[in-house]
Image (cartoon, rainbow, N blue to C red):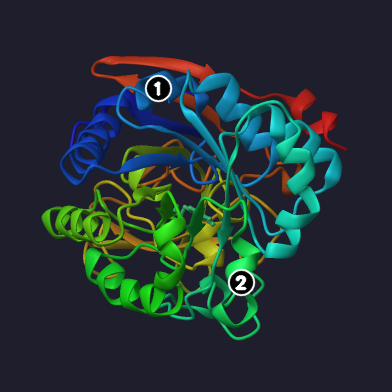
Amino acid sequence: MDISFVNKVSTPCYVIDKQLLVKNLEILKRVREEAGCKILLAQKAFSMYSVYPLIMQYLDGTAASGLYEAMLGREEAGGGEVHVYSPAFKKSDMEKLVKICDHIVFNTPGQFKMYKDMIENCGRHISCGIRVNPEYSETEPEIYNPCAQGSRLGTTCANINHDDLQGIEGLHFHTMCEQGEDVLERTLPHFESRFGKYLSGLKWVNFGGGHHITRDDYNVDALIELIKSFRKRYGVDVYLEPGEAVALNAGFLVCEVLDTMKNGMDIAIVDTSAACHMPDVLEMPYRPNIVGSGKPGEKEFTFRLGGSTCLAGDIIGDYSFDAPLKQGDRLTFCDMAIYTTVKNNTFNGMPLPSIYLKDGEEIKLIKSFTYKNFKARL
Ligand SMILES: *Cc1c(COP(=O)(O)O)cnc(C)c1O
């Protein structure tokens, strides 16, 4: 891989690669066209709105987790549909949401009832849905499983009836995370056996996110067939709202080695941080790839990479290299477009990484951050 761009940026920074993004978007567009479904960008995974005009050439709109993301989608995603779902809405937020949303998905029939009058009297048509819990998910660990015992995410079939659906146009479920088409195929029968009886009067079903459609081994053809057959069976529109799949493997985090030391092993301290700039490395947890590195012991020189914060556990992982790391070396972490810029923080007063867009040979600075951004939030 050509990573000559790493010498043209100031670190730490995220570099989003336009061509890699387009590669994903082409796949999603094919699903939309061949399956006859709609696909939204789940902004919670990736909200770099400078590329929304590009994304909206391929997708139908945006999905929001609350008021601010809905506003961003309305402002920046051209005329794309604006959908919002939240476990519960505040009244003051709903007053603004009814002015900008096309779909509002409620977590319970009770939330819908609370806002039904406001929606009916807002002067525009809003398509309302209920998030249901099909009580089947293959997602692990528990913290990511929306169908775990006692989950607050979505209403179970025991807690909904026909009367609850007066004024409702669709159902929504979101039970997947980084999964293949096979998981959706095993999930749909659970959704259908519990909620299929309600679909005859409805307009749409939203299959949520977590579909890893743009991963190399994803069975895109099977997904297309599955959606086509579902649409045919029930006569409803189908929506998908992937976040990860839109920008999967489409970005990098470039950092610089600040120092090296030894403590029973070789350690390198970098000008980024797992805790601040790639929190999922600690939360999921997972081990991001670094261009040109190997697993510990695979190449001659193994280093533990740690962030420059005070957190003892701010460790990105152990990696091996062909040459010993030294101060000034640049390291490029892969798959850093998703769940990074949207989740980063300034713990320890760590600077926020700049954001660049790479378009072929050209590399453009989109955003950089200063002390003012740190101070403004506190
Ligand atoms: C997280 C989430 C998504 C996006 O999930 P990805 O795993 O990023 O595809 C979509 N819809 C809902 C309701 C979500 O909570």
Dot 1: element: strand
Image position of 182 with respect to 259: above or below: below
Q: Residue 155 carries which label?
A: 2
Residue 340 coordinates in the image, percent (x, y): 52, 45
Q: Label 2 crowding class (10 Å Cα cut-off): few <14, some 14-19, many 20+?
A: many
> What separation in Å lies between label 1 and label 2 (alpha carbons)?
40 Å
Q: In this view, does 275 lie to the left or right of 17?
A: right
Q: Residue at x 26, y 52 (%)?
A: 213
Q: Position of residue 151 (x, y in %)?
A: 63, 77
The quadrant holding residue 102 is top right
Picture residue at 62% right of the left edge, 36% below the top: 69
Secondary structure beneath dot 2 equals loop
Q: Can residue 268 be seen in this view?
A: no
Task: Please give the residue where the numbered disc 1 appears in the rendered image.
Answer: 357
Instruction: State the residue in front, 20 or 35.
Output: 35
Look at 35% across and 50% down and name the residue there: 238
Can residue 69 be seen in the rendering of this structure? Answer: yes
Q: Which amino acid does label 2 sit on?
A: Thr
Q: Residue at x 52, y 59 (%)?
A: 280
